[in-house]
Image (tube, rainbow, N blue to C red):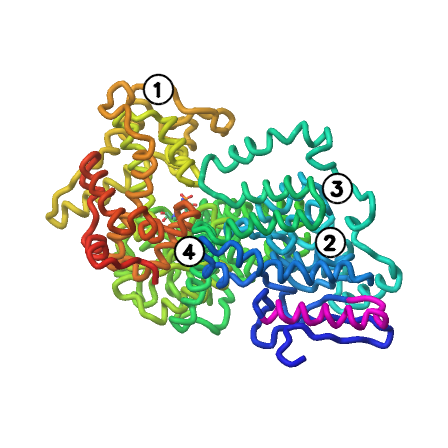
Amino acid sequence: MTDSTIRYEKDADGIVTLVLDDPAQSANTMNEGFIVSLGEVVDRLTTERDTIAGVVVTSAKKTFFAGGDLNDILKSHAGQAEAVMANVDRIKEPLRRLETLGRPVVAAIGGAALGGGLEIALATHHRIALNAAGVQIGLPEVTLGLLPGGGGVVRTVRLLGVVPALTQVLLQGQRHTAEKAHGLGLIDELVDDVDHLVPAAKKWIADNPDAVQPWDVKGYRIPGGTPASPALAANLPAFPANLRKQLKGAPYPAPIAIMSAAVEGALVDFDTAQKIENRYFAGLATGQISKNMIRAFFFDLQKANSLVKQYGGAGRAPVGTVAVLGAGMMGAAIAYVCAESGMNVVLKDVSPAAAEKGKAYSKTLLDKAVAKGRTSPEKAESILARILPTDRPEDTAGAQLVIEAVFEDPAVKNTVFAEIDGFIAPDALLCSNTSTLPITLLGENVSRTEDFIGLHFFSPVDKMPLVEIIKGGKTSDEALGRALAVVRQIGKTPIVVNDSRGFFTSRVIGTFTNEGIAMLGEGVSPVSIEQAASQAGYPAPVLALMDELTLTLPRKIREETKAAVLAEGKTWEPHPADAVVDRMIDEFGRKGRSTGAGFYEYADGKRIGLWSGLETFRRDGAHTEIPFEDIKERMLFIEAVETVRCLEEGVLESTTDANVGSILGIGYPGWTGGVSRYIDQYPGGIQGFVSRAQLLAARYGDRFLPPQLLLDKAATGGTFEE
Ligand code: NAD
């Protein structure tokens, strides 16, 4: 079969190995070619059944199978649900014929089996996986606003039971290690050597000639019972409420659809359950939110990660040694991610004790990873051994990369760069992790301004996937390419922005926190503010987030910005949030979580509830009752308007950077697909957004006035989609 994406290889014992190997792509996906090939090979297996002892399904690619074709989903629109259901049936039908062939079928999984890959494996009778890093197992469709429509809901529910399938696999889309997946029951057998995979599969076939799916055996019961059985039925009413609590009212349709498909499907026979799964899948696939999430979390990420090619940074030799200056909260965490990616790290602080303390942070993270089975003790030890804590500038000898993370003070930053200048490699890339100081100004004081660039990490560094790269006025393209390569080397996603106070991310998140605080000052109920932020889909309610960041931070930034603005001879406009922040700090002595008191009360470091003293603001405010929709949209709009200003001023050069940066860096709600898509898709399109922004400006202040770029797009009927 030419052009088949599945090779059909039969051995002397009558065992057929189906090798998933799309000749046109580096990864196997559920594209048209695969669907046709799957139908064909299953037809052939059926015809040759009498001469077949069993079937092994394996892959010739690095990943076992990459999943569904997301381009198809972007093309399916409302009204096309029937066509979508018919299309998933073209996958479900041959998979069902494979598992009911009457011959043992085994999946031999040597690479990641996520989404469609695991769905194929679930349609076999025995799953063997290579126990190695990179072999991730799971159904992450929910993270793209979808559900596994290739039988993934139906089979995980039947295999594991309703509750484990929902909580361990479907609702959060966890990517499990092979070992964890084995523990859960998704994988039946592990091997340590890739060369043992297919032989192990063949052995299982020889030992189990009569294998069938457990759910095809008469009398099979779903583990934990069906929703009709008393034990599960008693808990069932709490499911939707718990889910709503987890989602905090944010508009994500996929988890609700998944829960419905799982529960309804568990009450009926296999084929009906598949139809139910189809219906919910089609509802999600033809909706807007899955498209937003696919664009943002898949295509935009791909584009951002390929910036390294665009700027000539791909293919560079990896950095061998990095000097991290400052072993505080950020420096310690940056040292960890660098060491984890294979760099040798010289971690420098003012004293050996301070540097050691920074290294201890890595030990804590690694100990946790070992305890959870995410890494081996040997690997943890070798990562830790790569970090050299020191206070001696000469230890940075030969470093090809410098990442500075000392106090946010230009004088201190200048000093540390000067200290190491004579020791590091003569062409070392010089990076600062400043969150607010203009890169162009800082660059004036280093010896090689063209090699100086901003590398803005987010806390907690080991978890946050974004790095904002800031080009200074004199940064060379070569330095940018190198910085992009560094970001990719440590496995993060970059955005590239031009210099501006607060760059893109700090500037935009500042408008969000200020808006929440301003509403408090107007007398809006703090409970409503927090609830509105959650319902809008923000990962943390706005006042809680401000407590985490500490209230002294916006005041410091405000004072610095004010001084700079006045120095330029411009006028300074205070923000309505300023007075609230000042009162919180000066009158009430509440600076945020790190001091144990902020907008919230804390006990043993845990947030226990909003501080009752916030009533003062409610009493003194003028806008105590504003529409709940306004509270939500004031936050979503002010960030969107500020982002458009960043585009207009050239701080941002692309809307992809805007969308990736807004979601990954500062928690703009993922369902929107990013800040520019929120504007594009606002009811009435950009014109609708402009009218609403003007209304918000009239009610709450000129800061909502739409910038010219928005007015122009509204006038010409344009959009931000690139
Ligand atoms: P921190 O106060 O926790 O750490 C600063 C460290 O620098 C301290 O350990 C200090 O001893 C050390 N240091 C001071 N002078 C030094 C010198 N001469 N040589 C070596 N080390 C020296 O601060 P942080 O929160 O880690 O922030 C560091 C930088 O990262 C700042 O520029 C900050 O704006 C930026 N940043 C912070 C965050 C955040 O969430 N905290 C996020 C992004 C960027």
The reply to whether dot 4 and dot 1 touch (C-beta < 8 Å) is no
Helix or strand or loop: what does disc 1 sit on? Answer: helix
In the image, residue 51 lies in the stretch drawn in magenta: yes
For marks 3 and 4, the one nearer the N-term is 3
Specify the amino acid type for callout 4.
Val
Report the amino acid beneath label 3. Ile
Q: Nearer the viewer, mark 2 or mark 3?
A: 3
Q: Nearer the viewer, mark 4 or mark 2?
A: 2
Decide which of 94, 545 is in the foreground and name it: 94
Where the N terminus falls, by quadrant?
Answer: bottom right
Query: Residue 587, relative to residue 650: is it above or below?
Result: above
Foreground residue, 387 or 383? 383
Q: Quick check: marks 4 and 2 in contact, CB under 8 Å?
A: no
Instruction: Give the x, y percent position of residue 157.
Output: 69, 45
Picture quadrant of residue 105: bottom right
Kindly report the distance in space between the C-alpha atoms of the residues bearing marks 4 and 1.
38 Å
Which part of the image, by quadrant, shows the C terminus?
Answer: bottom left
Front tag of 1 and 3: 3
According to the image, label 4 marks what residue? 467
**What residue appears at the point 67 percent right and 48 percent down from the top-left corner?**
272
Residue bearing the label numbered 1: 613
Amino acid marked by disc 2:
Ile
